[in-house]
Amino acid sequence: MQKKNRTQNKAKEANVSIKDIAEHVGVSTATVSLVLNSKDKKGRISKEVAIKVKDAAKEMNYRPNMSARSLRTGKTKTLGLIVADISNPFFAKLARHIENIADKKDYQVMFGSSDESSIKFQKLVNLFIEKNVDGMILAPPQDSEDTIMQLIYRNIPTVLIDRCIEGLPISSVQIDNFGAAYSLTDSLIKRGCKHIGFIACNIGLPNISKRYEGYKKALENSGISLNKEIVCSVSFENFEQAVEQGIEKLIKEGADSMVFSTNRVGIQSLLTLQKHEKYLDLKYGSIDNPDEYKVSRLPITCIEQPIEGLGRRAFEILFRQIEDPSFDEVESVVLQARINELNNL
């Protein structure tokens, strides 16, 4: 009998309504609604009453009816976030920052990883559309232009992050990829490196392509000829094996240093390099600065991406689009990253 009463009490708590809170506090349902929707100041509700309403809602374990709210406001208070790989330290931190920022606006975030597949990316986008998310923040893989155009045509609030697609009228937030790779390569050149290898995962991606251009320009400006034998682009499939083969090639061709285009490439490359006697003699530069580098026993020059800034700016733009459907300005935000010397020896 006692167990049954507990179940009934839980059911009762789960069904607490605005009317129940209003009766408990002794105010109107309109007052409760304004307070719980953060509109108490606009409704000129006193601070004392607002506190009583919030305390009562917490005490009574009030949970808003999201379906009813969606029908009333036309919004689900949910966002879709698609990254390349949520296990990648960069994307994991980015997702966490976006989730924290969204939570402050009472938004929940649904996550997905495309694994750099345009097919999987399209499926995830379609799923989020079916779920009626209010907007999306996306790191698009290669060959995803048609999917992005679908979102533009349907006027679904969307912001690209980490990479952009040139020629499409859609807002984006990314770092100065060209400048970051230029600075990284130039730093290695100033340390006496002449045979600087470049290893990337899918050099055809817009952000990686820009990094490759920055690498080449730094070589050119220092009078160093580009040696394509020490440039390696590996695929996302069979990644570990592909990186190992790429590193073997760079060492065989006489690279005296290496630029890693992403932290994932860098981490896997260092695991492979530790098998070689000369790996302590080489110099390294990397876009991103994951924790794994700090225990690598190697001095690494890193580009520190402003991950929190990327997430914040992307959410700000997306939130503006959601709140004002008539807002159609395309914003292309480029943030500067800083160079960081890690001396782990």
Image (cartoon, rainbow, N blue to C red):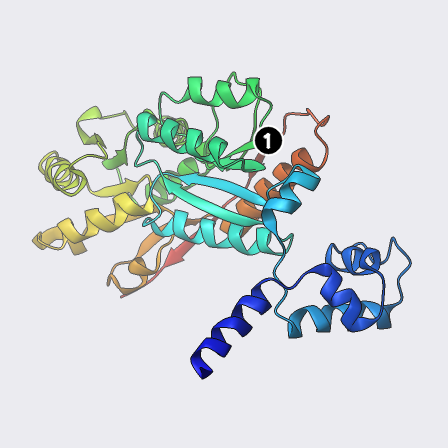
Tell me the SS state at disc 1.
loop
Q: Horizontal and vertical percent for residue 137?
A: 51, 37
Identity of the residue drawn at 83% across and 55% down: 30
Pick whichever, 299 or 10, lies toward us.
10
Identity of the residue drawn at 46% across and 37% down: 162
Pick whichever, 255 or 315, lies toward us.
315
Pick whichever, 242 or 277, lies toward us.
242
Question: Quadrant where the N terminus lies?
Answer: bottom left
Say which quarter of the image contains residue 222.
Answer: top left
Identity of the residue drawn at 21% across and 24% down: 228
Q: Horizontal and vertical percent for residue 22?
A: 79, 65
Q: Is residue 290 visible?
A: yes
Say which quarter of the image contains residue 244.
Answer: top left
Q: Is residue 119 left or right of residue 43?
A: left
Q: Is residue 326 left or right of residue 206?
A: right
Identity of the residue drawn at 65% across and 75% down: 59
Look at the picture and state if 98 lies above or below 323.
below
Q: Disc 1 designates what residue?
A: 157
Look at the picture and state if 158 lies above or below 4.
above
Say which quarter of the image contains residue 326.
Answer: top right
